[in-house]
Image: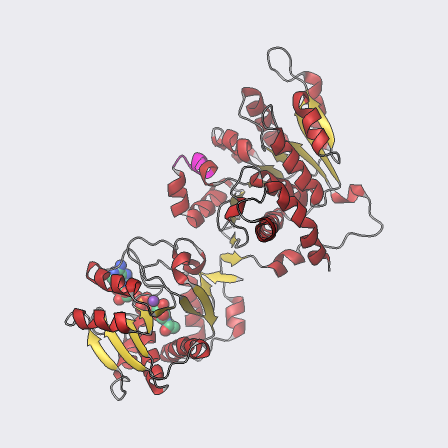
Amino acid sequence: MKVLNCEQSKELEKKAVDAGMSYLELMENAGAAAVRFMRKKFSLTNKKVVILCGKGNNGGDGFVAGRLLSEYGAQVSVVLVDGYPVTEIAKTMFSRLSDTAVRIVHYADNAGTVHLLVSGADFILDAIYGTGFHGSAAENLLPLFHSVRHSSATVIAVDMPSGANCETGAVEGECIKADYTVTFSTLKNGHMIRPAQEYCGEIAVAPIGIRSDLINSQEHSLEVTEQADVRSYFTPRNQESNKGDYGRLLCLCGSDGMAGAAVMSAKAAVRCGAGLVNVALPRSIYPIVASQVIEPIYTLLDYDHRGNLQNDSLTALFYALSSASACLIGCGLGQSKQATELVLELISKSQVPLIVDADGINILAENINILKTVQVPVILTPHPGEMARLLQTSAKDVQAHRLAYARDFAKEHNVILVLKGAGTIIAEPNGMAHLNMTGNAGMAKGGSGDVLAGMLASFAAQGMDPVKAAVGAVYLHGAAGDRCAKEFSKTAMLPTDILDMLPGLFLEIEQ
Ligand SMILES: NC(=O)C1=CN([C@@H]2O[C@H](COP(=O)(O)OP(=O)(O)OC[C@H]3O[C@@H](n4cnc5c(N)ncnc54)[C@H](O)[C@@H]3O)[C@@H](O)[C@H]2O)[C@@H](O)CC1
Ligand SMILES: [K+]
């Protein structure tokens, strides 16, 4: 599903105007769309509706809604929160209120009255700020925001909850917490990115008369993954095929004390259809891993008494790499000197897509320039803490700028960056980003990331385009996690339960 940023949204409106619509018509349709949404959901006759209007075009939509709601029998008060409108179209819409029963109140002169109206309202329509808002809400409005927060009215935000940045999803000060947000033509960044997303409530995308061919052809740089997208990434397995047709995945995963990561990533890779999985691991953990997952083959790594990898192990590892179609590095690998050397060797020598997770990322963070020399697709799957290490900042800072940081990193280092966490972002080097909405807090447990890495690497090994492999794996991993939460609860579900939900998901995809 397409998501537009503010500039793209303005571009789309301009195209509609070039194609014959007027801005006034767009505003009339926007206000009418908000009212249509309300009428569909609620009975409005004699209901008290307070419409908070800013001085920009978002306020203009509010004036339109006020006029129409009044025609439909609601008792409407329009509050001018910041004085009279300043744009020509909003001024026109304001003037059209003069022959109606709508009561107009200036917040600056009648704050007490406005607080009473808000606290007694059945519905509050928030048309203070829309896509034109940046920074934090004006200080003098904070008591009003406070009243709205404490009112029992149903709050409907027009286009965007006021106080949220539509472009970045940031909420820097007070913000209206809406029960519903009615937006126009397409979703915008702020509806999908936290923390703004949390203020939107249920989001409805309403048409405002812009032709669908203009919407479809509008350039965009963010997409929310849908099941239909993911389904299209898979082709049915050919009846005549054999294991050689489904790729060979080499996994350099696991170390003393972290055998489970190797088990989970390898199991996930096998579950997701790879023809052959080869796990390279220290001989010391082989019995544990192989007893838990028997489908892979194993390349055993032997170390001499000084802890250096023996030559024949290195030869075996590079032989495995030469026949692999993708290589997963890092789950439970540790950050020993030997692991570091191996990771850097594999990254610099690989001729096939590389998936770098967990300790592989930590090692990369110390040697980031190696990415300049890599010619193959590289997919990094950091959680916010690992991303913070890559960027030498804090996880909190990463979380506050998820989309921007993921995008910038992917561009700068020419990698596919999978920034995990609620609302995982997959950023491509060309600026395109994909947002994932599946998954839940029950997945916030050690091991979930190993499962994801194995899934992603499995798809890449089978020849799926690396971006699709990342987008598809993230979506299915979250969808499987959602099924686990339903069946086992968020508290009790295990990362390995995610693996058990994959067959059901693939059955649906294969239909
Ligand atoms: N452009 C169009 O053709 C359409 C626009 N529409 C509406 O227009 C909105 C965008 O309108 P605008 O671009 O006029 O912007 P907004 O109405 O969203 O807000 C801009 C106003 O808020 C003020 N403002 C911004 N940040 C502020 C801050 N931190 N503190 C105090 N004041 C601040 C600005 O000075 C400006 O007056 C959309 O969200 C949508 O609701 C709709 O009518 C559909 C058609
Ligand atoms: K608004």
Instruction: Tell me the quarter of the picture where residue 48 sits.
Output: bottom left
Residue 351 in view, yes or no: no
Left-right relation of 385 to 259: left
Residue 403 inside the magenta-drawn segment: no
Residue drawn at x 30%, y 58% is 134
Residue 174 location (% of width, % of height) = 28, 57
Q: Is residue 437 above or below residue 53?
A: above
Residue 468 in view, yes or no: yes
- In the rendered view, how is the structure colored? secondary structure
Residue drawn at x 32%, y 71% is 124
Q: Residue furthest top?
A: 305
Residue 176 location (% of width, % of height) = 32, 62
Magenta segment, principal secondary structure? helix
Q: In which quarter of the image is the N terminus?
A: bottom right
- Judged from the image, the quadrant occupied by ligand 2 is bottom left
Residue drawn at x 42%, y 63% is 201
Q: Residue furthest bottom?
A: 99
Residue 160 location (% of width, % of height) = 37, 64
Q: Is residue 343 above or below residue 198?
A: above
Residue 394 location (% of width, % of height) = 38, 37
Q: What are the residue bounds of the magenta stretch?
A: 387-393
Report the front residue among 220 and 425.
425
Instruction: Tell me the quarter of the picture where residue 340 sits.
Output: top right
Q: Is residue 257 above or below residue 231?
A: above
Q: Quadrant of the C terminus?
A: bottom right
